[in-house]
Image: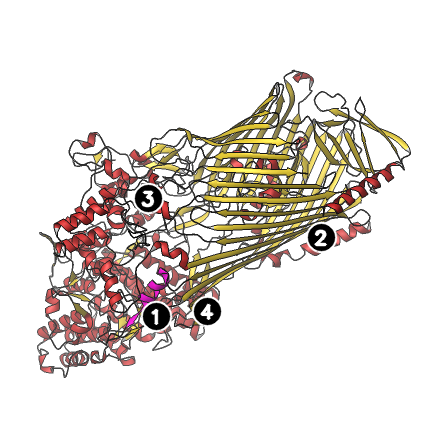
Amino acid sequence: MKQIYIMWFAVVLLTSCDTEFLDVKSDKSMVVPMDLKDFRAILDNGAMNDLAPSIGEIAADDYYVEFNAWQSMSDVASRNAYIWLDDVLNDKESNDWSLGYKDILYANTVLDGLDKLKIASDEANDIRGSALFFRAFKYFHLAQVFCMPWKREGNDEVLGLPLRLGSEVEYKSVRSSLEQTYQQILEDANSALGLLQYDNSIYKTRPNKTAAHALLARIYLVMGNYKNALKHSSASLNKVDALIDYNQLNFSKFNPIERFNSEVLFHHRLSTKTIWGTSRQRIDTTLLASYSLNDLRRKAFFKFRSDSTAYFVGSYDGSATQFTGLACDEVILIKAECNVRLDNLQEAKNDMVKLLKNRTIGSFDIASIPSDKNNLLNYILMERRKQLVFRGLRWMDIRRLNALEGLNYTIEKKLGDRLYTLPPNDKRYAFLIPLQVISQSDMIQNQR
Amino acid sequence: MKVSFIKLVLCCILFSAFLFSMGQTKTKLSVVDILTKKGIEKASVKLISSDQKIITGLTDGSGEFIWSAPNQRWIRIEVTHLAYETLYFIVKEGTEIPDPIELSPKNNLINEVEIVNTGYQRLSKERSTGSFSMIKSDDLMQYSDRNALSNLDKLTSGIVFDKRFEENDGNTISIRGRGTIFGGTAPLIILDDFPYEGRIDDIDPAIIKSITILKDAAAASIWGARASNGVLVITTKNGKGLRKTQIFTSSSFRLKNKPDLQELNWISTIDFIEVEKFLFSNNFYDNQEISPTKMVLSPVVEALISKREGKISDLQLGKIISKYSTYDIRKDMERYLYKSEFGFQNTVQIANSNGINSQSLQLGWDQQQSHTGLISNRYTINTTNNFLLWNKLQLDLRLNYTLNKMNAGGLNYSDLTSGGSKRIYPYARLVDDQYNNAVVLKDYRDQFLDESYQNGLLDWRYRPLDENQLINDKSNRHQGLSNLTLRYPIFKGLNIETKYQASLYNQTRLNLKNKDSYYVRDLVNRFTQESTNGELSYPVPYADVRNKSIQTSYAHYFRTQVNYNFKSVNHELDVMGGYEKRISDASNESSTIYGFNNNDLTFAILDHNALYPMYYNKSFRYRIDNGLSLNATSDRFVSYYANMGYTFKNKYTLSASARKDGSNIFGVNTNQKFIPLWSIGGAYNLTNQPFLAIDIIKYLKVRLSYGFNGHVDNSMSSLPTMRYTNGQTFYPNLNYAILVNPYNPDLRWEKTGTINVGVDFKLSGGVSGSVDLYQKDGTDIIGDTPLDPTLGIMGLGLSYGSYAYRGNIAEMRNRGLDISLNTVNPIDKLIWSNTLNISYNANEVRSYQQKNNLNGSFFVGTGMKVNPIVGKPIYSIYSYSFQGLDEFGDPQGWQEGQINKDYSKILTSTNVDELIYHGPAVAPWYGNYRTRFSYGPMSISAAIAFKFGFYFRRESINYNDLYQDWRGHSDFEKRWQKPGDELKTSVPAMIYPNINNRDLFYSNSSVLVERGDYIRLSDIRYEYNLLKGSIKCFAMVENLGFVYKKTNARVNPETLSDLSLPRMYTLGFSLRY
């Protein structure tokens, strides 16, 4: 009998601590996100600052490609987007739509996690503000390619984006109205502004108060709310007002402008496309001709080929990848434009002087700035285009100026003998949502 | 050595003689033939008592053996006879010596006293209710493969290898079909009672005594949550049961021909040059010429450019092209990259036993030199020791050590590329006219390489044949296993045993790249920085690069088990139950050292954070990879199990088993970690039943079993998880996280319910065999369901691309049949024997939660991707309907009820139910057949293998691949070239600009699908035995080609490779003393 006791003793001893035994993590680098450090790490994922929608920029007109180069491209999506064909997003599963919503899930995961954590520290607020900032940024950029432009009225009858605001798997995509979409974007951006703790970030990939003002300025400008755009652009400049002097750039470098230079408030890149490869893209000749010879941007932004065509090297990413983040140059241009539109002509002029004296060889000729409102506005818009080349903003500008300000601008593209045109407010200003998305969700497709 | 063994033997004999002389009481037993029930004369009987007394002797004319001895408890009995299989068994506590003892005649292929090992217990096959197949050492050793499992499909039924995939440690084996949709199919491998996590390659086949395949629930469910894919139980040799010291040695040599690279269906050199000329005339290369990345252009295109620029004349161009036209890289590769594969295998085994204690020692050495020069040497040492410690406590010890040393070889035909995804151009050469190692263009344009060389960069050219000497890639793999078993009988019929296994695994790989290797020169050059005044600086030093990676794992198993046996005249009961725990910790790490000097072990410290513009394209900025990685995992399992077997009157058997498993699958609630799995089974032995008194039936048993097995996917988690990662794109020092799993609270393990009906029989005329019918129903099968990308859930490497959800969403079913038939026909002195194994297995997805009307483009393809559609097999072939070529040579499809060539429409709007379903991509019928003629000492045998009822998609021309990646197919010759050709060919015309969707449509269309059925002559073997089999010599030829092949395509339907299996020759010799 003694032996049986020993046996039972052995069995009991061995089985007593199974629960703890099985609680050990199977893979050391895997973590269930639980604390602030984890949530910060999720937002610090570099992908949150990368791959913003690029179809808009592809479809815009700061550059052109030759027929041959266009034809030999294997990237069908870019080839079609260039001339606004429908089949732009269905050949690849990583497309502008899915990448945008992936980042939105990251932001939502952090927001849901913070809700459960119930911590109200400064750091917690800063992380929540960051997540809301990212969500606003992503929705705003998706709206610029998948929704029709914002109009003065009737936006509640226009299709917006499906607004995914949580991280649960059981979610049914339904498109909101454009009104609701922009309300959500504004709500997120404004809450972010209130929650973010710092005027500057140690890492330019992290959102901050200054960047939140700049983002709000960008959003209000697209909505034609010049008063608020002016308010936020001024607020942003009050916190950080740094312009790099292009005279100091190292022009021997292939990309003369550095990544994370002092002008940058928040770093974000566009998704790179082969259509912009330096052997393919040619800068629009009118745009190129508009830079005067003592304009340093000519040298900082472009490299010239032997046939005097040029390609863009002036990315604020300091590389071949294009920048679409927030920087002081854009904020000043927003401020100047709003000032003109709100009849503060002198202030608008001052803004332009401040910007351009950093972009010119020698002293800048203040007299070259027109004085009457109309000419000044056109001058600012032209300078906006000249400063913000390949920043993912040209497409937005054409859309908003056609929809809100009656610009009546038609984009034209020539391939071989054929001319392609995109008249103002055409339905093709909203790209088709990927078919895969439509078939999985039964959402309403954009009109054609 | 030998002297001491003889001494040992002498001691044993003296000892037994001493015991024998102590006999007092007379006792007897009788030995009879199992079939005729007649006594066997001159059978040698050996009895061993619990206090180690031994009695030996021979039976008399009536088969009786009488001895006189005190009233001992005999624990071991061994009966041998020349014409019969040796019978060896342990008399369990509380049972009597069976009387009469029945012996089976030799060559009796269905062996009624066969003992099957489940890893937890040894069962007599006669008393089992499950479906087992057993492969013995002699059968396994017919093949001299270094991998113990790679020939199982030639030896039994129900096992098949999916040779379309690269073999990588058991991932291609499937036992009775695929029971999981996305999980692995590798069966659970048990080596000496414990799950084996190491590499199959590290088990020396020479030490294997038997492999038992547990096929149904009654057999396998004792292994619980990991048994769904079937279980292979490997038992190794030891000294138990020997009557004397035995020495066994064997050697074999094998030689495998080079593959014939002319079988590669590549576009011919002449055609390729024509294509390049055609593209050149269409300005296809204009953009590549000015490519900022200095994209490589082929020599012919370079020559055409030179001609256009007036650097060479028409005549010179013609000369260059006609010279290139005569080259064929396949010839060079076959000649310079490949050689015959060579290998040998040696083993020496010494074993000794005195019936109570036994020892064995085995040494093995296996070498293999592959076609491309990979040399691997495997050294093994195995020792076993079995003692009776004190009183009744039995100790078994086993130590096993394997060292595998590998020296990586050279390039194979698919490694040799022209950079990126480009295939090497067909007129490349490996050796030039002066017999120097030739330059192959790779990565950059030739002209750019010249310029950079003049600017002071290192020579940037690639000479493939130089590389072999410049890269030293060695790995050493150590594996140690130690097993310890303690067994103690508590009282009559009840014993307790404790087992412990510790295993250690370590693999170190050292890859040293000489500074003159292309890898290092390319790295140095790419990172070379040029200042404004043209001065060069080198962030990566021009010196050797050393990469080292270490993989280590430790595992501990602990098991305590109680066994109970009761036997009376009519009843026999076996019960066992136990508890098992397992920890397995693994880690791997790797590091790279730059600027390495192997002579004085100095190295350079580099800046891995800085972004450097690349020399070949200043707008590309990269960091120098630090090559650091760290990983660690810990797997834990806890299991409780029990098994019961009851036999009534030696006719009716009932069995039942149950098991609970727990594992630290990340984040699952503890209560979900435990799933109970169980089985029940019954068997009925109908032999000698009055109603079956037919002369022809000598033995008949029917079996029926039902139960559940599980399958675990350790990569899944129910909670949202993230993975910390190093090296953020923008701030390399910032740690960041990626989301890995979405929240899935309902995650469960996959479960397979199996019902099995089987018959084992033996008929007169030497015919025996078994037939098993089964149905396996998988529930809670893990599947992917495509998700709306708006959810943002991006899984890792799921099907349907990344936007999918993985969960327990599917059900599936396997149905099948395993037939084994054996015949032995003596015709005078000639013995003719045959073995036929036929299997049928078809699987079907029973339910799958996904939306209907899925886009067909997910499902068309080669059938090598898992394609879950309800009602269809997991691997199936689907196509777009092919409606011939039109008068322009364009392929035509079917869309909305009419012939159509709007390819993007066909691709985006053909739903899955509008596709053509051809059939399974994995053969439902398969098997093997071997026939053998033995005449005296000689025997000759031949084997065939076959598969039927499956489909495959052959490759054809894809113009996008041809233009962009230089990957052309020989079907190019048959392409449409002029109106009227559409009546003769189905290969589309060459067009420019190319339409990618046209290629996609054609390559996934029905015209390229073929039946795969084949019969293959797998080997012919000749064997000669001397001295009653103690010396054995054999010669064997393997891979003798197809006897029958349904398809005419120049493809091997078994591997889907263009290349046929090279013939292999083996010579072997063994000696047993």
Which of the chains bears the disc numbered 3?
Answer: B
Q: In this figure, which residue is indicated by the disc labeled 4?
A: A37
- The residue carrying pointer 4 sits among few (fewer than 14), some (14 to 19) or many (20 or more) residues within 10 Å by Cα, namely few
Secondary structure category for the residue under label 1: loop
Residue shown at 19% from the left, 71% from the top: A301
Q: Which residues are magenta?
A: B517-531
Looking at the rendered structure, whether the residues under marks 3 and 2 are on a common chain is answered as no
Task: Please identify the quarter of the rendering in which residue B214 is found.
Answer: top right
* Residue wearing tag 2: A11
B302 is higher (above) or lower (below) than B601: above
Label 1: chain?
A: A
Query: Residue B689 appears at what percent x and percent y?
Result: 69, 19
Q: Earlier in the sequence, mark 2 or mark 1?
A: 2
The Cα–Cα distance between marks 4 and 3, rounded to whole angstroms, is 59 Å
| Label whose residue precedes the other's in the sequence (4 or 2) | 2
Q: Which residue is mark 1?
A: A205
> Furthest-bottom residue in view?
A363
Instruction: Give the structural element (helix, strand or loop) at label 3.
Output: helix
State how many labels appear.
4
Co-location on one chain, circles 1 and 4: yes
Do pointers 4 and 3 mark residues of a single chain? no
Q: Nearer the viewer, residue B759 or A412?
A: B759
- Measure how far apart labels 4 and 2 are at the Cα level: 42 Å
Mark number, residue B424: none
x and y percentages locating residue B114 in the rendered image: 66, 33
Q: Position of residue B52 (x, y in %)?
A: 82, 42
Q: Amino acid at mark 3?
A: Lys
- The amino acid at mark 4 is Lys
